[in-house]
Amino acid sequence: MTDILFGQSYYLRFDPKLWEAMQPYPPLGTMYAASYIRQRGYQVAMFDAMLAESEQEWAYALDYYNPTYAVIYEDNFNYLSKMCLLRMREAAFAMIQMARERGCTVIVCGSDASDHAPAYLGQGADFVLLGEGEETLAELLNVLDGRSDTPFSQILGLAYKEDNIPRLNPRRSVMRDIDTLPFPAWDLIDVDKYKQIWYERHGYYSMNMVTTRGCPYHCNWCAKPIWGQRYNSRSPQNVVAELKWLKETYQPDHIWFADDIMGLKPGWWQEFADLVEQQDARIPFKCLSRADLIVRNADNVHALRRAGCQIVWIGAESGSQKILNAMEKGTTVEQIYEAARQLHEAGVAVGFFLQFGYPGETRADIEKTFQMVRDCQPDDVGMSVSYPLPGTKFYENVRLQLGEKQNWEDSADLAMMYQGPFTTAFYRQLHVVLHKEFRARRDWLALRRVLTRPGHWRRAHVRMLAAICYRLVTLPLARWRLNRLARIPHKGLAPAPHMSLEEASQPTPQPE
């Protein structure tokens, strides 16, 4: 018998857009929790939902491992988990029920569960870990396993039912010295399966790491149910030790540093780059940062390049200073332009995260964002629509406008869930227009390099030229449709055919 079966409820198969893109990463947060608990003497196993076909594979894992405890521990480092998608919530509820049917004690941890603990308890979870989960989980397991007699009421960061009433204890302070954490439990992951998918689909293999926990900035739309405003960083020495171990053990071609903000502490990037060079730990990587952090210290850009950075994704959000100020982003449009310039000059690619639909945004503001993309020529863009999640100032400002649907179905939903500037259909069409224009311009800039050298033309270049022509030909019609949709008033959303949180909070019948 296995003591604990860890799992998570993000199924790539249930997210059509990202299933098509097929760039899967294992659940790093779950792997950290499994490693942390295993270090304390428990026998652990893992179910990885990322590449599973359905929740039925969780049932198979429960039957195979026969665990005492089923821990559905979400990957809090993956933005997809932090989006609290409806389809994944439904999967979590199904997984809870399956575990209960097999007599397991069910423990849940994650962003959605922290925001809606009573709903998860109502669906059959015995306990919900609020916020950062490792220390709370260890303390809870010690009580359940008879190693401690601490009352549930005194375990910080724990939610449970008492007399059938949900009880939410005060939050636990987050861990500060995260260098003491063991490395993620990669031995519990089918690394060969991930590697095969990456090589077949993309020609290289990418793995994921994190160097920090949390974010100290105050963007008023950003939900932070796990770490709040706290920000703690691993030392460059600790990160490079893991990087070198991954390089020697699994030979990845690329690393995704999944931090919200990487290298915030002064001098961190320089020391990291030095150690990477000294220890021959260099692996090409991508990471996230902010425009103001890039322009504040030019040495950071060169250190990024030395360390192996291929692309920095920046939360640009908008080309309108009015919207950035409303978001309390703390950056300027000028800083976005300058950060893109500095990174490109250093030979580092730039990605822009863009957000549309924030209260007060007009067509003129949208056009400023389009112009910023044209001027800065980022190497990639990602688009989202303002998404009110509990715990944010933005959510409180629009809470009374929300309908029954308060979460997206999947990552491509782009639903306008409050009385925003335009309709959901408008923003979905805006996504089409943005990517048609951006990809046509980006690919044309790349293709120009071989136009004057016919001997260098390849079949891929011909396909690229055909794609450019198609996008340019269809762009006027796409813009016409966008303009037509802009004239339709936003009248709110129809009720979604999903279980409400109030219904979810009611206990489900349990097997006798």
Image: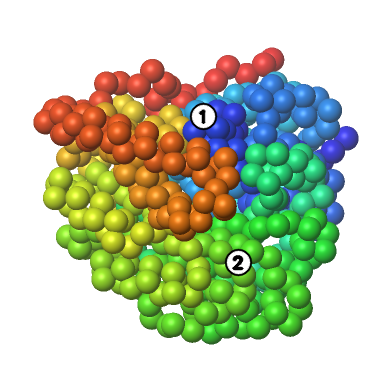
Q: Is residue 23 left or right of residue 441?
A: right
Q: Is residue 109 left or right of residue 26?
A: left
| Image quadrant in which you'd find residue 276 | bottom right
Q: Which residue is nearer to you in this view: 58 or 20?
A: 20
Instruction: Kindly check if marks 1 and 2 are in contact, taking CB atoms under 8 A apart as contact.
Output: no
Where is residue 268 drawn, in percent x and y?
Answer: 56, 80
Q: Which mark is residue 211?
A: 2
Disc on the earlier residue, 1 or 2: 1
Q: Which mark is residue 16?
A: 1
Q: Residue at x 73, y 36 (%)?
A: 47
Where is residue 198 drawn, in percent x and y?
Answer: 68, 43
Q: Residue at x 19, y 36 (%)?
A: 422
Quadrant, the N terminus: top right
Quadrant, the C terminus: top right
Q: Residue at x 55, y 32 (%)?
A: 20
> Considering only vertical position in the picture, is 350 above or below 275?
above
> Considering only vertical position in the picture, is 49 above or below 308?
above
Where is residue 292 drawn, in percent x and y?
Answer: 36, 73
Q: Which mark is residue 457?
A: none
Q: Is residue 187 left or right of residue 22?
A: right
The amino acid beneath tag 1 is: Pro
Residue 168 in sight here = no
Outermost residue to the right: 1
The amino acid beneath tag 2 is: Thr
> Considering only vertical position in the picture, is 261 above or below 277?
above
Cα separation, mark 1 vs mark 2, equals 29 Å
Colour pattern of the rendering: rainbow
Q: Which residue is nearer to you in this view: 87 or 15?
A: 15
Q: Residue at x 51, y 29 (%)?
A: 16
